[in-house]
Amino acid sequence: MKATGFISLWTLVSLPCGQLANPAEHEDVVKHAIKLHRGKGVVIAQRKQWVMESCRKLSGLLRQKNVVLNKLKSAIRAVEKDTGLSEEEKLFQVHTFEIFQKELNESENSVFQAIHGLQRALQGDYKDVVNMKESSRQRLEALREAAIKEEMEYVELLAAEKHQVEALKNMQHQNKSLSMLDEILEDVRKAADRLEEEIEEHAFDDNKSVRGVNFEAVLRVEEDEANSKRNASKREVEDDLGLSMLIDSQNNQYILTKPRDSTIPRADHHFIKDIVTIGMLSLPCGWLCTTIGLPTMFGYIICGVLLGPSGLNSIKSIVQVETLGEFGVFFTLFLVGLEFSPERLRKVWKISLQGPCYMTVLMIAFGLLWGHLLQIRPTQSVFISTCLSLSSTPLVSRFLAGSVRGDKEGDIDYSSVLLGMLVMQDVQLGLFIAIMPTLIQAGVSTYSSIFKEILRILILIGQILFSLAAVFLMCLVIKTYLIGPYYRKLHAESKGNKEILILGITAFIFLMLTITELLDVSMELGCFLAGALISSQGHMVTEEIMSCIEPIRDFLAIIFFASIGLHVFPTFVIYELTVLLFLTLSVVIMKFVLAVLVLSLILPKTSQYIKWIVSAGLAQVSEFSFVLGSRARRAGIISREVYLLILSVTTLSLLLAPALWRAAIMKCVPRPERRSST
């Protein structure tokens, strides 16, 4: 019984199918296993009896297995020669026999693979953790592949069951005459089967052998319901629809992106609930911030904090919410570009180009200096400095929304300078994302290869500059020949129906976004340029499009700022409040001072007074540091602690930004314009 239990246990583990060993090799393995078992404190008589009994049972099972395999082969030949069976019934029976053959072979393989595993474990050093870790990894991989094989066998059984049903239907149809309706349904059934075969993608089979693909163990979690009957029925439905959640061993959660059967419409109810919850809670949070004199966007951030992992943890589809929030950034930058005419862009383009570049170089220089004093790796110092040099374009565009921007004739508008510099920082963001792989390689390279990495970075900068030149040349062509006729056509088709106008403008935004993305420039720049190109058609066009797009922008901006709140962790901020306040104030003051210094050098003397407002607008950290920080953490550039510090400093700087902005407005802007700017 012990031997039988041992064999039954290991038959549950299916390891990779290979060529089955011959009986002589099996006998050698069995003898070796018996030798390993001897001398373990068992009474000699009992040991001999156990050995004899185990060998007899094992050899008996192997002989019985060979007899059954021969009978199965004979049965398959008999079925194939039977002319009284239909093709469907033959297919079903042969398929069933083959599955059983495979099950027997896999069970036999499992027994001897288990003995080989025991042999490796006994030959290993129990004090060697690395060796035990490798053995554990091999067993884990074997179990994963075993689970995959069981899944495939289950799928094959389902296919065999389907063949059986088809065979029974054919037998019934042969025994009775079909009505016209039955014939129609039978034709529809066959057409539906062909459709499923045509649209079905064998993604699993096609990708399981691709290089870099790993087998993972996952948990499938269903929704909890108080009523067990309702829970059971719902589970059956979700099994069919594939709407349950998967969780891997690293605690990553997954939802269905593309179903096997594309003929059935599906909806992600987790995502729907998340958006509904954010929309409902954003209203009281926004009202509260308005009451106490804060911008409404901080209410939306608070909403994200309350619903996120550090609060109620009710948001299930975090990645989907963040993805939808990105569209808020796209439409925000489009409206910024819509108010930023090419004439204003031409007026400040030198300042917009020089200012961010000088600030980034100075931030990196200070970062390397502090990194050298604190013994931080240069790669980490460069990354942190670059992250902190970026400022938030959506936040500043909110500050500038509705402000009066008509300055004295000949003077430079502070909003033009500020937005131009922010757009240039978005271009720098795309450049930094492009060179991040090289930065990762530089972190592990020797000094002999540093020159190659620097050369590679210079080549990437040249490619980005070439892409920028191509983008602006394309914009010139669109402004000269295409945008005018395109808008007039939209305007003519949309009389009495704003749907065509909204769709046409949105398509143009996405077109520019796609072009800049293909040219390896940031998508945000494409959205901004789309607005600037349309604004060249005149003030009336700008007002009409703004009235249509602003409601869309406002809703998506709520989602965007709420997604920022999902990454705010109040408990961590409270634990390290003193350190975080010191770091945040240091970063804000440093960015403000550097911006004032740079603008003092590049601004005309008649416009020096706007340097305080522009510097106040730049003295915070962009929300895109979340994206850069997450990529750097996965790549090993920064540690978990540094990542959390970057997130917290970014959040606190965004919270301090309105106070600094209002102080600058109160000091530098005349009273009539101040009211509209704040």
Image: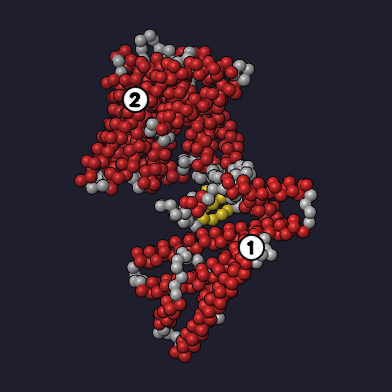
- Eyeballing the image, is 647 above or below 88? above
Label 1, residues with CA under 10 Å away: few <14, some 14-19, many ≥20: many
Amino acid type indicated by mark 1: Lys
Q: Residue 364: x percent and y percent?
A: 28, 35
- Eyeballing the image, is 429 above or below 228? above
Name the residue rendered at 55%, 59% in the picture. Answer: 151
Q: Which residue is the extreme one toward the top?
A: 409
Task: Give left or right: position of 527 versus 275.
Answer: left
Name the element at disc 1.
helix
Q: Residue beneath label 1, please?
A: 90
Task: Give left or right: position of 14 versus 587.
Answer: right
Q: Quadrant of the N terminus?
A: bottom right
* Residue sitting nearer the eye, 604 or 487: 487
Name the residue rendered at 52%, 26% in the picture. Answer: 506
User: CA–CA distance between discs 1 and 2?
Assistant: 67 Å
Front of the two marks 1 and 2: 1
Q: Residue 653: x percent and y percent?
A: 40, 33
Task: Give left or right: position of 179 versus 155.
Answer: right
Name the residue rendered at 52%, 48% in the picture. Answer: 254
Task: Give left or right: position of 468 versus 560.
Answer: left
Q: Residue 574: x percent and y percent?
A: 44, 43
- Eyeballing the image, is 676 above or below 84? above
Name the residue rendered at 46%, 43% in the picture. Answer: 569
Whichever of labels 1 and 2 marks the residue nearer the N terminus, that label is 1
Q: Residue beneath label 2, please?
A: 469
Label 2, residues with CA under 10 Å away: few <14, some 14-19, many ≥20: few
What mark, if any, has residue 102 been given in the picture? none
* Residue sitting nearer the eye, 36 or 223: 36
* Residue sitting nearer the eye, 442 or 672: 442
Residue 411 visible to the viewer:
yes
* Residue sitting nearer the eye, 40 or 258: 258
Q: Which residue is the extreme one toward the left?
A: 448
